[in-house]
Image (cartoon, rainbow, N blue to C red):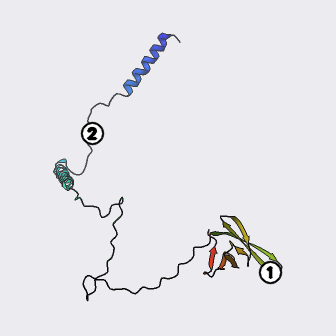
Amino acid sequence: MTWKTYTAVSGATVLAGWLASAPPSNTPAPAATSRRSPAATAPNAGNDIEEQAARLQARMRQEPVYREPARNPFRFAEREVPRPAPSAAQPGTLEPTALEPAAPALPPPPPVKLSGIAEDRSGDRLERTAILSSQAGVLLVREGDAVLGQYRVARIDANAVELTDTLGGPPVRLTIRP
């Protein structure tokens, strides 16, 4: 192909593309026949448009009322300290209140978690071993074994271990968490 034929083919392609993409002519489309007459629908359409425009303008004129927010998520609320009312006998003085003995504080739970329970059948007897995780590492204990010096394994169930406090504290029950 020579440069002359290349130019002629390219020019013809550009011309064909330009003519194909030309905007359509402004010839009116044939009017569709309808049962209503054009005079009957024109006033209703105009009124309907005017009503819709008035409704939208009225809606735009309404401004939202600003309200102070009920809370500020960036500040803590100040706590109100309840003050006891002064006694009627002597204004300005407080009544002495009887001090109730405070309930004894519970000791903190042992720093161990129940990781699992292993079962071993030997004949008719079922022996369970509890697998405990602590800061010292993994502990494998059976009923009666000492745990961390302060606790003793009282009972091992299918999904829980009961530890008794050798210092007299309440028993602790550890369960397997899924």
Q: Earlier in the sequence, mark 2 or mark 1?
A: 2
The front one of 51 and 68 is 68
Quarter holding the C terminus? bottom right
Q: Amino acid at mark 1?
A: Arg
Mark 2 → mark 1, Cα distance in angstroms: 99 Å
On the image, the x and y values in percent for residue 164 come to 66, 80
Work out whether residue 156 can be spotted.
no
On the image, the x and y values in percent for residue 157 come to 69, 78
**Element on which disc 1 rests:** strand
Q: Amino acid at mark 2?
A: Pro
- Check if mark 2's residue and mark 1's residue have beta carbons within 8 Å: no
The front one of 153 and 33 is 153
Neighbor class of circle 2 (other Cα within 10 Å; few <14, some 14-19, many 20+) is few
* Number of on-image labels: 2
The residue under label 2 is: 30
Q: Residue at x 52, y 81 (%)?
A: 104
Q: Residue at x 48, y 14 (%)?
A: 6
Q: On the rendered structure, is 97 left or right of 113?
A: left
Q: On the rendered structure, is 91 left or right of 73?
A: left
The residue under label 1 is: 125
User: In the displayed structure, would residue 90 be above or below residue 8?
Assistant: below
Q: Residue at x 35, y 60 (%)?
A: 75
Work out whether residue 123 can be spotted.
yes
Quadrant assignment, res 145: bottom right
User: In the displayed structure, would residue 112 be above or below residue 43?
Assistant: below
On the image, the x and y values in percent for residue 173 come to 63, 77
On the image, the x and y values in percent for residue 171 come to 62, 80
Neighbor class of circle 1 (other Cα within 10 Å; few <14, some 14-19, many 20+) is few
Q: Residue at x 42, y 17 (%)?
A: 11
